[in-house]
Amino acid sequence: MRSLEAGGPATPGTAARGILLVALLFRLPLLALPPTLSDDLLRYAWDGRVAAARQDPYRLPPDAAELAPLRDELWQRLPHRDVATVYPPLAVGLFSIAARTPWPQPVLKGVLTAADLAACWLLIALARRRGVPEARAAWYAWSPLAAVETAGMGHVDALGVAAVLAAVLALSGRRGRPAGEGAARSPDRADGRAPVRSGEERAAAGTARRSGLPAALTAALAAAAGVLAKLVPLVALPMWARRSGRPALFLAVALVMVAAGLVPVFAGGVPPGLVTYGVSWEFNGPVYEPLWRAIDALGLDAAARSGLDRLEAWTGAWRAADPLYRFVYPQLLAKLLLAFGVLGAVAWSLSARDPVAGSRGLFGALVVLSPTVYPWYVLWVLPFAALTRAPAWLALAALVQLAYLPRLVPGVGLFPWVWLAIWGPFALLLLARPAAQLRRRLAAREPAA
């Protein structure tokens, strides 16, 4: 890969074909792998069966009496049978189509593997458009994480990632002159020579100028498809709208498409499965795990309950705050704080000039601030980390698979040692560049001896 980035003998077309061929060969053997690391594929098959039977998977959990005629060995293997589905309509529609075939799980894995290979192709196209080496796409295409979680475990995230890459590709405008890692002429330097600017910086500078109505429309449709496959890209719509050059058109198209899919789902209120996921789910959160423990150790939940007591005494409404007491516990308080962090990340993303770097930053913030980080969640960041060569995220793509150890090895717990092995190196790599920049600034301010 290094030789290709340095300008090796392979032509761009040859590099792309080689990347895609290896990616395909890497995934084909994994299609036969049973879902041993995750139960999600089983749930996809069940939700598809429920939808194909014209029942409502958003209101009826697998244990619902109305679904008793559908029960078989698949139902017996399902975890969380008391929780209704959390997957958006495009995903459930795919599950339903697969359920109508004789082999629902192999069909789902095949379709999602095709979506993942499409994501690899879109990433190569995005590298070309930005003028960076195509070989960077191999960091995603050849990643064991991507191959195992899509072809092996069959996670629907592959469909959402492909849609997101299609949206960002459209936002990146038409292909300009190859940028590579070279320089552009500018009078900014005193010697008249061009300053060195990366391909990413030049792509960012030209994005808004090159984006037109067809690009904004394509990006909006792809972004909506991503949201309807999995809700993750919803937070990126404001940033992408701003970068589209036609924010009103982008938001109108994207939100109308999303509403068309989600309004029937939310017509009877927030689906119970989403409520359960938001309130109760937690696993491997890098900030969440230490945060809720700190809240517990400091007694901040007790302080919050005392605050509610004082509020009732001050207002004289002794029963007004009673419904809130059951929500005042360390885990939920930590989730509320992290939710504010997500809002801050969305606000920050509006200032991003480059949709690739902005998407990496925003999806990365979602992963860091999420109470639940399964290994396949990192797939949302990995393509953008590959293009921008972000070492912390590339390392995390390998380390996050250690989260499977508690499932595979009896008696091994996640926190603190496995959690630390995953997030410790990531944090060091993530902070290394800002620390180096700070050292350089401090050195520059020191007076000469």
Image (spheres, helix red, strand yellow):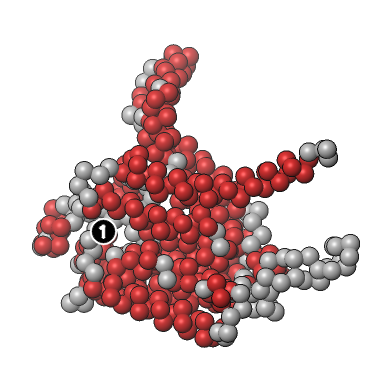
Front in this rendered view, residue 377 or 347: 377
| Residue 402 falls left or right of residue 195 | left
* Residue 344 visible in the shown view: yes
Using the image, determine if residue 204 lies above or below residue 311: below
Q: Residue at x 64, y 56 (%)?
A: 352
Q: Mark 1 sits on what residue?
A: 37
- Name the one closer to the observer, 45 or 258: 45
Q: Is residue 105 left or right of residue 26?
A: left
Task: Please tell me which residue is depicted at 55% across the width and 72% down the height of the picture.
Answer: 2
Near-viewer residue (6 or 214): 6
Q: Considering the image in quadrants, where does the C terminus appear?
A: top right
Q: Quadrant of residue 439?
A: top right
Return the x and y of residue 173 as percentages of the image width and height.
Answer: 64, 74
Q: Is residue 308 above or below residue 78?
A: above
- Residue 239 placed where, x, y %? 59, 57
Q: Is residue 213 left or right of residue 335?
A: right
Q: Amino acid at mark 1?
A: Leu
